[in-house]
């Protein structure tokens, strides 16, 4: 697991100077330099990719249509620094395509799940009916912390009646959307979202969670999300993409 920390205050300016070699840029002010350097932090999801994808010469992705399951909007989500400035439309992060809905094309743009302080789905099920190598969830986690209790999981139900679970566990594959400390593993990558017109902190963190199917030869009938509603942490699903075995 690697940890990425953005340094605050004046140290941030010096860090960005050294990291991005902007001394020779023809920029009008320190603010221009810092803005340009900070903007480059957002290029990471476009330049890197999940290692697992190297196993496939041909990649057949399928973007799941989540519109009928959405029950919340980015601009109205909890908090002063919400996801109002998320980039919508077709995106490709870490080699995986996603469709991020906008409020102009759908009444709701994300799937909000229930916790003790947020209303939402306790559980929902999305039909798949496909054979897949892996599944990718573009998510945000509100109030995720070690002391928070409650069960959250994705369940992958096969046509033969059996299933596999992906438990969302803080410190393993679930991290909060707020802190400047960002964690990633081979199966978890982060995407930064601005909280203003500026590219400077604070940011919000989206995460892409990769699930590798142990039985890619079997058809997944549907994907179900389960929450027991306990605790304050809530998972917000923004996009789901499948890597097909078809």
Image: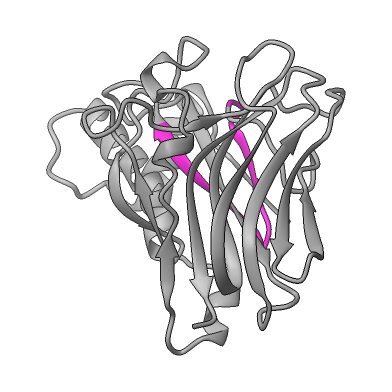
Magenta span: chief secondary structure: strand
**Image point 20% across, 50% down: which residue?**
24
Whether residue 225 is visible: yes
Q: Is residue 89 left or right of residue 209?
A: left
**Image point 41% across, 34% down: which residue?**
193
- The image shows residue 231 at horizontal and vertical percentages of 80, 19
**Image point 41% across, 50% down: which residue?**
65
Q: Is residue 145 above or below residue 174?
A: above
Q: Which residues are magenta?
A: 178-193
* Rendered image coloring scheme: one colour
- The image shows residue 12 at horizontal and vertical percentages of 46, 32
**Image point 44% across, 26% down: which residue?**
201
In which quadrant of the rendered view does residue 125 lie? top right
Instruction: Looking at this view, name the residue that lies furthest to the bottom.
Output: 57
In-front residue for pair 183/237: 237
Q: Is residue 208 above or below residue 194?
A: below
Is 192 covered by the magenta stretch? yes
- The image shows residue 91 at horizontal and vertical percentages of 33, 53
Q: Is residue 229 left or right of residue 80?
A: right
Is 204 covered by the magenta stretch? no
Quarter holding the N terminus is: bottom right
In-front residue for pair 145/131: 131
Q: Is residue 168 above or below residue 2?
A: above
Whether residue 96 is visible: no
Q: Is residue 220 left or right of residue 130?
A: right
- The image shows residue 162 at horizontal and vertical percentages of 81, 65
């Amino acid at each position: 697991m690697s940890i990425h920390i953005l340094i605050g205050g004046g140290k941030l300016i010096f860090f960005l100077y050294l990291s991005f070699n902007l001394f020779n840029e023809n920029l009008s002010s320190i603010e221009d330099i810092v803005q340009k350097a900070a903007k480059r932090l957002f290029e990471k999801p476009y330049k890197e990719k999940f290692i697992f994808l190297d196993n496939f010469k041909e990649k057949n992705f399928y973007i799941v249509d989540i519109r009928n399951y959405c029950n919340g909007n980015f601009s109205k989500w909890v908090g002063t620094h919400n996801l109002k400035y998320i980039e919508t439309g077709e995106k490709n992060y870490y080699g995986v395509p996603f469709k991020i809905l906008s409020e102009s094309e759908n009444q709701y743009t994300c799937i909000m799940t229930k916790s003790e302080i947020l209303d939402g789905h306790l559980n929902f099920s999305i039909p798949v009916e496909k054979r897949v190598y892996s599944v990718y969830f573009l998510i945000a986690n509100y109030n995720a912390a070690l002391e928070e209790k409650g069960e959250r999981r994705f369940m992958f139900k096969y046509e033969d009646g059996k299933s596999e679970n992906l438990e969302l566990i803080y410190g393993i594959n679930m991290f909060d959307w707020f802190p400047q400390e960002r964690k990633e593993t081979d199966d978890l990558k982060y995407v930064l979202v601005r909280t203003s017109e500026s590219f400077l902190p604070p940011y919000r963190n989206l995460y892409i969670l990769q699930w590798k199917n142990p039985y890619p030869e079997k058809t997944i009938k549907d994907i179900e999300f389960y929450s027991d509603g306990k605790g304050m942490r809530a998972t917000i699903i923004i996009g789901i993409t499948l890597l097909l075995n078809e």
